[in-house]
Amino acid sequence: MTNRAGPLAGVRVLELGSFIAGPFAGQLLADYGAEVIKLEPPGGGDPMRRWGVLQDGQSLWWPAIARNKRSVALDLRHEDGQAVARALATKCDVVLENFRPGTLDKWGLGYPALAAINPGIIVVHVSGLGQSGPRSREAGFGSIGEAMGGLRFTTGDSGSRPARTGISIGDSLAALFAVVGTSTALVERARSGRGQEVDVAIYEAVAALMESTMVDYERAGVLRTRTGSVLPGVAPSNVYTSADGAEIAIAGNADAVYRRLCTAMARPELADDPRFAGHEARGRNSAVLDAEIERWTSSLTADDLLGVLAEHGVPAGRIYTAPDMIADLHYAARDMVLRPKTDDGEAGPMAGIVPKFSRTPGEVATVGPRLGEHTRAVLGALAGVDDAAWADLLRRGIVAG
């Protein structure tokens, strides 16, 4: 139905669900060229349309998280809506959903039912606690996944309550694993010809990134906890203040990089100081070393400081805010600030496509659609809904558009 660019061009995805975890995965798949058909309830649609910062009653996030998608307003709680969804699934490669486990089965849209009519279908589930296990049927939001996955316990300052990272990181991590699972299942299907289920739990997506926390505790008795801006035992690696008040992250913990940092500071003697000579020594004396570095950083403006550090090959960067990202020349050079146009003007700025593909780049062809904008066209082309059936569904409120 659509001519999309990107490495997933030709793949059709039926997106069911709302908010972030499932729809962000759908956004990424659409970024890579998949045709994503988003089913939304008639009336209000996905609550993300009214989520976060609003302008004229509309979410400023919606154009990005729904970009490149086609909106079909269909009532999945009605058996006729479910029948239409099954018809659509016969023409799709992937069904992506983030309802509470068991919901799709209740509606006749679970994997066994869909595989019976489309053996190649890949059903990707995103949920708080997974499709199996004693707690699988519980409601699970991203914040609970971050808590159970261990991230909240390690986020924040020492002595403080567990902190949020500032973004919905649990949902986003689950979405990334959903895209990995989808892509991997598509590769396997090319060999076997068979579909399968992909089960992504938010808490597991978080736990998978928790490095060696479990083995550190069980084998060495080390319990990682909140340490603010420092990584215990690794120095120097912190945030330092410049003369003009900017916050600069400096990572000089490797031995060779540390020596270059000392040269940049015009303090070569610190490289051989017994307190800082070697990784373990610097870790033990990180507070003293950080104080020495801060005395130096606070004597230079941020631009001068970053210039000196770059000249000496020391990794460093400003702690960016949104205005910094928008104005940054490197962001611009790599198309990381997009400003797609709409009939009503500009929908951006929004983040660009990640990763970059050299031969089959993705694109942002459209931004978040109006609710039900594509219902009639999609149902006519893919679900065999003729004019009479359309009029009947519309009259009964099962569709909108």
Image (tube, helix red, strand yellow):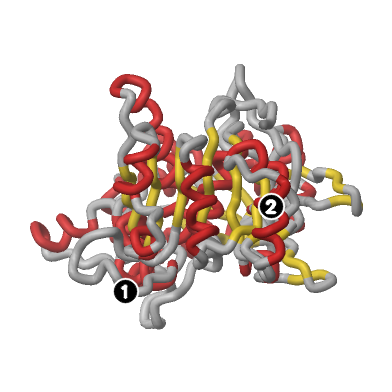
Could you tell me residue 14's position as x and y percent? 52, 45
Q: Nearer the viewer, mark 1 or mark 2?
A: 2
Residue situated in front as seen by the camera: 235 or 156: 156
- What whole-number distance in Å separates the C-alpha atoms at marks 1 and 2? 37 Å
Q: Which residue is mark 1?
A: 138
Q: Name the residue type under label 2.
A: Trp
Left or right for 297, reference 199: right
Residue situated in front as seen by the camera: 233 or 210: 210
Query: Which residue lies at the image location 27% right of the left edge and 67% below the top edge?
Result: 136
- Circle 2 packing at 10 Å, graded few (<14), some (14-19), many (20+), is some
Residue situated in front as seen by the camera: 381 or 279: 381
Q: Residue furthest front?
A: 388
The label on residue 390 is: 2
User: Pointers 1 and 2 in contact (CB under 8 A)?
Assistant: no
Please tell me whether mark 1 sits on a helix, a strand or a loop: loop
Left or right for 108, reference 317: left
Could you tell me residue 172's position as x and y percent? 49, 55
User: Taking the image as drawn, is residue 250 in sight?
Assistant: no
Please tell me whether mark 2 sits on a helix, a strand or a loop: helix
Q: Which image quadrant is residue 20 in?
A: bottom right
Could you tell me residue 160's position as x and y percent? 40, 82
Query: Which residue lies at the image location 46% right of the left edge and 35% below the top edge?
Result: 93
Q: Is residue 74 above or below residue 397?
A: above
Left or right for 277, reference 289: left
Q: Name the residue type under label 1.
A: Glu
Residue situated in front as seen by the camera: 331 or 256: 331
The label on residue 354 is: none
Query: Which residue lies at the image location 12% right of the left edge and 65% below the top edge?
Result: 221
- Circle 1 packing at 10 Å, graded few (<14), some (14-19), many (20+), is few
The N terminus sits in image quarter: top right
**Nearest to N terminus: mark 1 or mark 2:** 1
